[in-house]
Image (tube, rainbow, N blue to C red):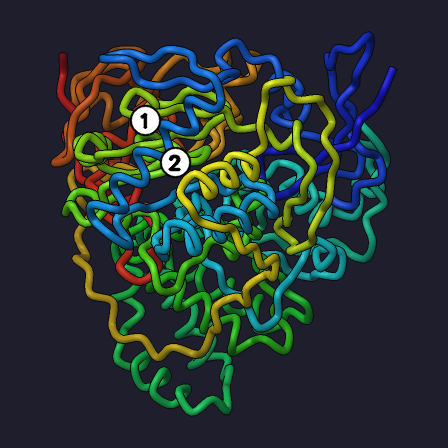
Amino acid sequence: MKHNFSICPHCGCGCGLYLVEQDGMINGVTASQNHYIGQGQLCARGWTSYQLLTADKKVTEPMTRNGQGFSAASWDKALETAAKKLKEVGGKYGQNSIGIITSSRLTNREAYTVKAFTQSVLETQNYDSGARLCAVPAKFPNQADTQSLDQADLIVVIGANLLEDNPILGQRVLSRCKPEEDRPYVSPDLTHLIPGPSAKLAVLDSQRNLLSKHAGLFLWSRPGREGHVLTALLKQLVEKYNIQSADPEFRKLKENLSKLSPGQLLDGSGVNHTDLEALAKDLSLAKSPVLLFGKNLLHQSEAFEAWTALLDIALLMQDRLSVLPVMNGANDYGAGRILNSPDGLSYMEIIEAIGKKRIKGLILIGEDPLKTLPGRDLVEKTLGQLEALIVIDSYPNDCSEKAGVILPWRLSLENDGSFYNLDGKEQAFKSASQPGKDSRSLEGILEYLAKAMEGKLSINMKMPEPEAVKLDPFKVIEIESEVLPFNLELGSVYPHLFGDEGQTMGSYHLAREFTGGYIELHPEDIADLGLRSGWKAKVVSDAGSMVAIIKANPNIYKKTAFMPMHFGGNILAPFQYDAKLKTPVFKGIPIKIEKI
């Protein structure tokens, strides 16, 4: 029996694991006891990750379009066909006519190779990764890591459903905040010795998630109003608790904040003044507070305002407050920085450029815009305009049907490589499972295409510096104060991760946990609509419509609704992204709910 070390390919925790091989077959996983984050633990995704290697739908051979369908092809034929299509588009339309969108679960070596191929062979800056949809490649002035939790006396979690999206990190937070009478305690895997006195836990989110139930202070915001709440918090810290800065922009920031009334900021947000004041007081008194924030903060129409207020708080309190961005994908940190093109188009801008006929060819590597972007109908129509679509993936996705060529992509478990976890720590691993004899690495695929297209790869494996951050005296938030008739939020549900559907459905244990889409409504709203839990209803928005099963959830605001985006819910979201952060909008979507 062999135990082959690798890194979990799902979320940004990057927990260490061993694939168990016996008689030449991999049939299980054990957790790495010595991994500094996992500490002998894995979540359901990690424990079932070995199933990704033998999934029934795994792409195992190249395919080329044959009329309306596909047929298996040799590697040489498939690569020649792909190269020919890309050359035709480049020759006909010139530079910047081809774009590349990749998964954020590329290894670092793969990401560097994609960047080199795009710049030196395709001669374009239009490349991006799925990390763009959940993270901003910027470094905070006092960046935290998971070890910072051990010294924290206050932990603030904003827009991060940790116990679903990053369960091991969520457990670390809960461990740190356990009351004294529960220490030390024994987990199913090992005894955790928790240093120091218990930390306070505060949560700001639009959902009463599992973590919020353990928080001493929970600020329950209506979906999409977190920017208002954070601005109100910033105003409290500056005006009531006299948080100051020598930055020349601080005076202007203070003037702008003075023009805002607490009522203007909090009315309609759902958060009451007492709770906000309590959080401001806790932050002002804490000696070593740690703030964690996740993708839910960035998936709203006022994402930039929320981000700016949070950034200003971090800058003003950098002598004490440390900040940890919670990464969604396994290599969001690495891919997000390596494949961040300052002079090119972002993920959603590339799709937009296809619709405007500025981009005619697209290479998708491990990414499915039809599942991850708002405005599914528009995205599908847009992709249909492409003259060349090359899909490189481990599993067939919804975009595969439109491709001219489909090429297998090795899983990270089959690869040598490295990921950066959410701490920014590079973790190397060796291939824990032998790929098929006819399999090719992504580097090999791109090297072949480069040669066939008469180009040469020039790979520079130097991690780009993160975007610089500075104090921003942003202006008054302009948004209607009234609550929409029905305000929809799209999000993730355990064990799914946003953008990870291929891998989730590749594990039969995870895939069977959900059978389809549903919509959560407050019980009183269900009754007012003349409906019942378990019935089906038609959900309609300006972008599209779908039928979903109704579920009662008393832990959401009345006149709001929640749907998982993993089962086609993104058809209801208009194609919209934040103009500055380039992150998609999945909150605050006006909908109607109709009987069927």
Residue visible at 62% across and 72% down in the picture: 285
Give 149 or 581, whichever is nearer the viewer: 581
Is 343 left or right of 383, judged from the image as shown?
A: right
x, y percent for residue 302: 29, 57
Q: Is residue 131 above or below residue 390?
A: below
Tags 1 and 2 touching, CB below 8 Å: yes
Q: Amino acid at mark 2?
A: Leu
x, y percent for residue 411: 59, 28
Label count reads 2
Is 211 left or right of 76, judged from the image as shown?
A: right
Q: Amino acid at mark 1?
A: Cys
x, y percent for residue 293: 51, 54
Residue matched to label 2: 364
Give 527 or 439, whichever is nearer the viewer: 439
Residue visible at 64% across and 60% down in the picture: 154
Binning the other alpha carbons within 10 Å of mark 2 as few (below 14), some (14 to 19) or many (20 upward) gives many
Residue matched to label 1: 399
Q: Is residue 164 above or below residue 325?
A: above
